[in-house]
Amino acid sequence: MISITTDGGVQGLHLRFTGEHRSSMDDKATTTPDVARFNRWAATYDESVLQRWYFGPVHARMLDLLMQEAPEKPPRCIVDVGCGTGRLLRAVSVRWPEAQLIGVDPAGQMVSQADRLCPKATFKVAPAESLPLPGESADIVLSSISFHHWAEQGRGLQEIARVLRPEGLFCLADHTFRLAGLFGGKVRSRDEIRGLLMSAGLAVRRYRRLRVRCVLIAVAQKGPAGAS
Ligand SMILES: C[S@@+](CC[C@H](N)C(=O)[O-])C[C@H]1O[C@@H](n2cnc3c(N)ncnc32)[C@H](O)[C@@H]1O
């Protein structure tokens, strides 16, 4: 990205090369009403009653499933997409203390809280649709109750497939409760989720339903090296 800045005391304009690439997709995905709502909620998000009743049990079940599916070799790099305040990564750091942890979320205020609450991890402000991570760099990618907020779900899943190493795992948890769609989200059925994952090159290995909370958890895997 090239930005034009004025420098205090020095006259004239300076071109600053940041090395970052910003696309119109970044802008579209980071300026949605959902992202604005999470920016407003960030300061009190962790105190919500939903943490104990809803998010906590979903996170625990995701990690249980991953422990069953993950290879015996400990993961080196784990990424949480739509990480919010980093609560899931805090639980991950207990199970895999040696892993490098990266959280990504387009809501800058959520990321500020995450930075404060989870110093073991690195956080980046970005949407799923444009992950600021190198290809084939993550062993595990997680995403919890975020998918229905994404502006372009197919594009986000392609990005996740890109950053996963061959045979890496993706664990996605989201509502499959259709009425939740009335509030503006893109809630998908289990079959739609499987189709979207497959189109991105991710094959579902296992599902788990948390019926009381109307949440589906899917663990999918990228193919081996060289597979298209
Ligand atoms: C309900 S919160 C869940 C946060 C966290 N995953 C958790 O389980 O506590 C949904 C998160 O999705 C994020 N989000 C919204 N649009 C997104 C996008 N396009 N890509 C990634 N995350 C997004 C929001 O900013 C918010 O932090």
Image (cartoon, rainbow, N blue to C red):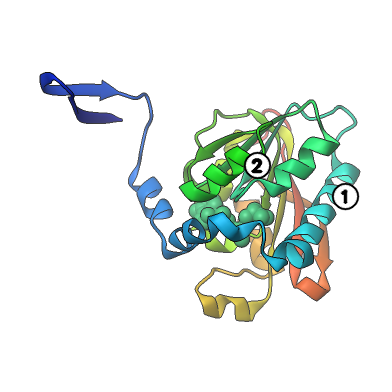
Residue 156 shown left or right of residue 24 in the figure:
right
Q: Earlier in the sequence, mark 2 or mark 1?
A: 1
Q: Secondary structure at mark 1?
A: helix
**Residue 203 marker:** none
Work out whether residue 95 or residue 22 is closer to the camera in this orientation and state it: 95
Query: Quarter containing ligand 1?
Result: bottom right
Residue at point 60%, 51% (across, down): 84
Work out whether residue 47 or residue 59 is closer to the camera in this orientation and state it: 47
- Residue beneath disc 1: 64
What is the residue that sits farthest to the top in this orientation?
10
Q: How many marks?
A: 2
For discs 2 and 1, the disc positioned in front in the rendered view = 2
User: Where the N terminus falls, by quadrant?
Assistant: top left
Place of residue 226 in the rendered image (x, y in percent of width and height, measured from the top left): 67, 28
Place of residue 138 in the rendered image (x, y in percent of width and height, measured from the top left): 67, 32
Q: Secondary structure at mark 2?
A: helix
Work out whether residue 121 or residue 82 is closer to the camera in this orientation and state it: 121
Classify residue 158 by image quadrant: top right
Residue at point 49%, 49% (across, down): 109
Labelled pair 2, 1 in contact (Cβ < 8 Å): no
User: Where the C terminus falls, by quadrant?
Assistant: top right
Work out whether residue 228 or residue 114 is closer to the camera in this orientation and state it: 114
Residue at point 65%, 60% (across, down): 145
- In the figure, 217 relative to 100: above or below? below
Q: In 3D space, how far apart are the residues under numbered discs 2 and 1 (Cα atoms)?
A: 23 Å
Using the rendered image of the protein, determine whether residue 152 is visible from the camera's viewpoint: no
- Residue beneath disc 2: 117
Using the rendered image of the protein, determine whether residue 53 is visible from the camera's viewpoint: yes
- In the figure, 179 relative to 78: above or below? below
Q: Amino acid at mark 2?
A: Leu
Classify residue 77 by image quadrant: top right
Q: Amino acid at mark 1?
A: Asp
